[in-house]
């Protein structure tokens, strides 16, 4: 199991065990057992979809508090372009940037600035023919984790470049070193984030080793203070800080990154269900006529992140109006720039989260058992068992985290009293992944007995053999 930091958390006290979240998780990382939900850590991609759909607000995201700023002598804010869409009647980005400086940041560097550099690098790499098409954007960290978990065959299509956030942080730290002469430990760089996946990638990066960002502050946390600070600013006291244009700010909403490539053959999809369908079609080689695919887990793009405050469609419309006052782009790479400086420093590997076992023979045996159990289940995918689908329940049974009696339609339930065979979500006690070693043996014994029972029922005259 991978040791991964997660920004999405669960509040047991608020959880009612309602099973709303299990259906929407793209990696089937949530189960309901013993009247409470729990998250399977190595499957979670921190997309925040469970936060969005939980009616009891039992799922939440953690981020840095303002108190973290006092640890550093020099503090830099990296505002996401989606931040601009949170404010009504905004016609000048400098109000936001100066507002951040008034709040206590010593410098502000726009992530949209880094986005324009990445767009330029992507255009050059596609024109050079060095990328496998269709190229999949690497900007959304939740998409990267989804691909390595569910679609590992598509890893070779991912754009192997730093995200705009990572490159902007690198530029900001280099500038701070030159201007202040301070060591890195005295320079604090904080991203103003729209989603938990960004913070997770800051804490446990997948594709690079050097980390220039010290933390992430949620847009919803900084918004109330920032909007009051902006209201007090006068036009004559604004410092010109804006250094990005239409292409960079356009990354805030779905389609902005792809449009910035100035190519016609591209696809842009947003929303976890939609991008999953696109990845399935891409895996089936149905989209090979495209040059570029932009995928965003959040509805509408980053403007739809669960840590924002505004409706994503309203925020998108505001950003479209704001872009009318901007130049096309303010940043491009020098002609002799070495693109290796923007490339990943670590190779992206498939996640082992879905593996049944490390041993191939054991994994094949468990898969045979899994298919046999799945075939015996009704295939309704009702979720009453606490798993998102019948296949997921079969997977849990094989791993030892559930039993066939969890299915309310199971034959085994008909031979037991109702109190003894309550569905898994409502039981007082239930297995969880912490008991993996103990569960593997139980699952094998249970399935072996079940298969013999099925064989006997099919042919009553046949004697059982061990």
Image (cartoon, rainbow, N blue to C red):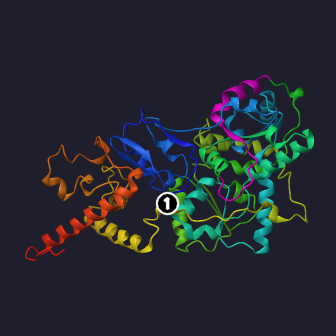
Q: Which residue is drawn at 30% across and 58% down?
A: 380
Q: Is residue 82 left or right of residue 34?
A: right
Q: How many labels does the image show?
A: 1
Between 312 and 221, the one nearer to me in the picture: 221
Q: Is residue 46 left or right of residue 429?
A: right
Q: Is residue 391 left or right of residue 227?
A: left
Magenta region includes residue 226: yes
Q: Is residue 417 left or right of residue 117?
A: left
- Height in image: 30 above or below 445? above
Q: How crowded is mark 1: few (under 14 residues within 10 Å), some or many (20 or more)?
A: some
**Image quadrant in which you'd find residue 19:** top left
Which residue is identified by label 1?
353
Task: Point out residue 416 in the picture as x, y percentages from the top left corner.
Answer: 14, 51
The span shown in magenta is 205-232
Between 61 and 116, the one nearer to me in the picture: 61
Task: Point out residue 128 in the picture as x, y percentages from the top left corner.
Answer: 79, 73
Q: Can residue 202 be seen in this view?
A: yes
Q: Identify the secondary structure beneath mark 1.
A: helix
Q: Residue at x 90, y 27 (%)?
A: 236
**Image quadrant in which you'd find residue 442:** bottom left
Q: Residue at x 65, y 57 (%)?
A: 206
Task: Point out residue 246 in the picture as x, y percentages from the top left corner.
Answer: 78, 50
Between 312 and 302, the one nearer to me in the picture: 302
Task: Point out residue 103 in the picture as x, y percentages from the top left corner.
Answer: 77, 28
- Height in image: 450 above or below 328? below
Magenta region includes residue 260: no
């Amino acid at each position: 199991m991978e040791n991964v930091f997660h920004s999405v958390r669960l509040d047991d006290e608020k959880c009612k065990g309602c099973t709303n979240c299990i259906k929407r998780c793209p990696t089937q990382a949530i189960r309901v057992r013993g009247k409470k939900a729990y998250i399977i850590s190595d499957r979670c991609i921190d997309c925040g979809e469970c936060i969005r759909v939980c009616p009891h607000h039992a799922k939440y995201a953690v981020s840095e508090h303002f108190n973290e700023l006092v640890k550093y002598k020099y503090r830099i804010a990296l505002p996401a372009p989606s931040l601009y869409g949170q404010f009504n009647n905004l016609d000048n980005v400098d109000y936001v940037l100066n507002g951040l400086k008034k709040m206590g940041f010593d410098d502000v560097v726009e992530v949209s600035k880094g986005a324009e550099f990445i767009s330029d690098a992507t255009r050059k790499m596609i024109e050079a023919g060095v990328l496998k098409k269709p190229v999949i954007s690497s900007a959304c960290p939740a998409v990267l984790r989804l691909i390595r978990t569910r679609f590992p065959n598509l890893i070779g299509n991912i754009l192997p470049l730093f995200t705009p956030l990572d490159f902007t942080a690198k530029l900001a730290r280099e500038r701070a070193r030159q201007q202040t002469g301070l060591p890195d430990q005295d320079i604090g760089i904080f991203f103003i984030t729209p989603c938990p996946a960004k913070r997770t990638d800051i804490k446990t990066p997948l594709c690079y080793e050097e980390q220039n960002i010290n933390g992430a502050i949620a847009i919803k946390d900084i918004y109330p203070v920032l909007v009051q600070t902006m209201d007090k600013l006068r036009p004559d006291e604004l410092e010109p800080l804006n250094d990005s244009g239409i292409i960079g700010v356009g990354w805030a909403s779905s389609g902005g990154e792809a449009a910035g490539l100035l190519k016609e053959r591209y696809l842009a999809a947003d929303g976890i269900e939609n991008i999953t369908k696109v990845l399935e079609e891409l895996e089936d080689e149905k989209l090979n006529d495209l040059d570029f695919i932009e995928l965003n887990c959040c509805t509408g793009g980053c403007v739809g992140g669960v840590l924002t405050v505004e409706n994503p469609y309203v925020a998108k419309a505001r950003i479209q109006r704001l872009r009318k006052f901007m130049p096309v782009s303010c940043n491009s790479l020098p002609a002799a720039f070495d693109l290796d400086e923007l490339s990943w420093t670590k190779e992206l590997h498939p996640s082992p989260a879905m593996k049944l076992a490390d041993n191939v023979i054991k994994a094949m045996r468990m898969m045979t058992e899994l298919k046999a159990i799945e075939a015996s289940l009704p295939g309704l995918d009702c979720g009453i068992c606490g798993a998102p689908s019948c296949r997921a329940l079969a997977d849990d049974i094989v791993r030892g985290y559930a039993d066939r009696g969890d299915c309310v339609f199971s034959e085994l339930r008909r031979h037991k009293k109702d109190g003894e065979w309550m569905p898994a979500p409502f039981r007082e006690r239930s297995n969880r992944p912490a008991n993996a070693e103990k569960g593997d043996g139980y699952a094998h014994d249970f399935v072996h007995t079940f298969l013999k029972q099925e064989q006997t029922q099919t042919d009553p005259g046949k004697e059982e053999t061990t």
